[in-house]
Amino acid sequence: MLDLTQLDTILKTTIDTIRQGQRQMFSIAETAREEGKHLKQELENIQAEIQETIEQVDRCELKEKASRRRLARVSADFKNFSEEDIKDAYENAKNIQIELALLRAKEQRQREKRTELELRYRDLEAMIKKAEALISQVGVAMDFLSSNIENLWAEVEKVQDREETIFAVIKAQEEERRRVARDIHDGPAQSLANVVLQVEYCQKLLDVDPEKIKYELEVLKDIARSNLENIRKIIFALRPMDLDDLGLVPAVKRFISEFEKTCKISVDFKFIGGERRYASALEVAVFRIVQEALNNVAKHSGASRVEVVLETQPNAVAAVVRDNGSGFILEEVQGESSFGIRGMKERAALLKGDIHISSTPGQGTEVFVNFPVREDEFDAVDENNGCR
């Protein structure tokens, strides 16, 4: 008879296998969508080639009719044409007929290729729909399994998880407070001190050199504007307003834009799915995981390029962040100091999401996260208020 530890191992192995299948299906669907774009372009190209060939056939048919008429005239009146004229008429008619036959054969091959591409494109679309349906079904199965073994895992790991989670949350909060305090001290606080000095200087100029006040006020305005921008950046880091006002996608886009400017790392962003709003907690979790993954890229990877894929569906939200950086051995960075990775996993666990981090030295890193969504956790966004 199995004890709880053995049963827990079996269930974890089963769920890990299902999760791996879900990730593979997600990757297959993404690859199929890319192939679909290429096939669509090929179809457009072959259609243009067919049209060009049809025009060539039409022109060649006119030439062939003219050559047949000349051949008929020569054949009907041999006496008035030289032997060379007769030979030229026959050769010309023959060559044009060969050219016309080749063009028609070319047109037929092109049409067959177009038919083949259309069939492949339809099959690919069907495969994408099946993959999306399977991803949805696997998500439902994962929800079912997770909900049924939740109590078992809670009993087995409850005490240890609670202590580790509380410790990690407190430590993360303190780290965040230190970071915010440092940012305010080094940025707005120093800038405000300069503003005070600048105002005092302007007061002295009132009596000494009033003409110079205008220039000094311009300097003061630039300092205030820079200070305002720094404060806005700190506020955005604490809680992006775009996340509340516009939703997940615009907030991620803005962060990526700022990330590219600040870190000088190219980011290829792909958005798949409909324009939807989800529960605030879910949007914050996805945003923070993408944010933390990109911050880790900037701090540790040495990458020159990052790809971010965000997919929103009625029953799931998924994100992938992959880079071409130096990579690492995951087991070596999972200690107490790995707050970034631990924080991402905890955010995913709180909303029953699935997160997978894979990395190989010299081959980059990939972070995949997928959150299930219940129907009461999202609302469709209309065209006027949707994500842009």
Image (spheres, rainbow, N blue to C red):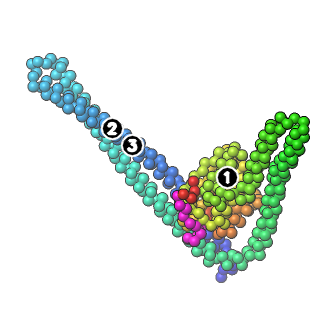
Question: Is residue 325 visible in this depiction of the protein?
Answer: no
Q: In the rendered picture of this protein, how many numbered marks are placed on residues?
A: 3
In the rendered structure, find residue 53 and report the number of the disc placed on it. Answer: 2
Residue 250 percent across, percent down from the top left:
62, 55
Where disc 3 sits, the SS reads helix
Please identify, in this view, whether the residue under mark 2 or under mark 1 is nearer the observer. 1
Residue 16 percent across, percent down from the top left:
62, 67
Where disc 2 sits, the SS reads helix
Tell me: residue 86, above or below residue 355: above
Q: Amino acid at mark 3?
A: Ile
Check if mark 3's residue and mark 2's residue have beta carbons within 8 Å: no
Residue depicted at x 73% and y 62%: 343
Residue depicted at x 67% and y 63%: 285
First reached walking from the N terminus: tag 2 or tag 1: 2
**Residue identified by numbered label 1:** 255
Check if mark 2's residue and mark 1's residue have beta carbons within 8 Å: no
Give, as a single range, the part of the protein colored magenta.
Answer: 372-383
**Residue identified by numbered label 3:** 46
Please identify, in this view, whether the residue under mark 3 or under mark 1 is nearer the observer. 1
Would residue 376 be counted in the magenta stretch? yes
Q: Residues within 10 Å of mark 3 (few under 14, many from 20)?
A: some
In the rendered structure, find residue 315 and report the number of the disc placed on it. Answer: none
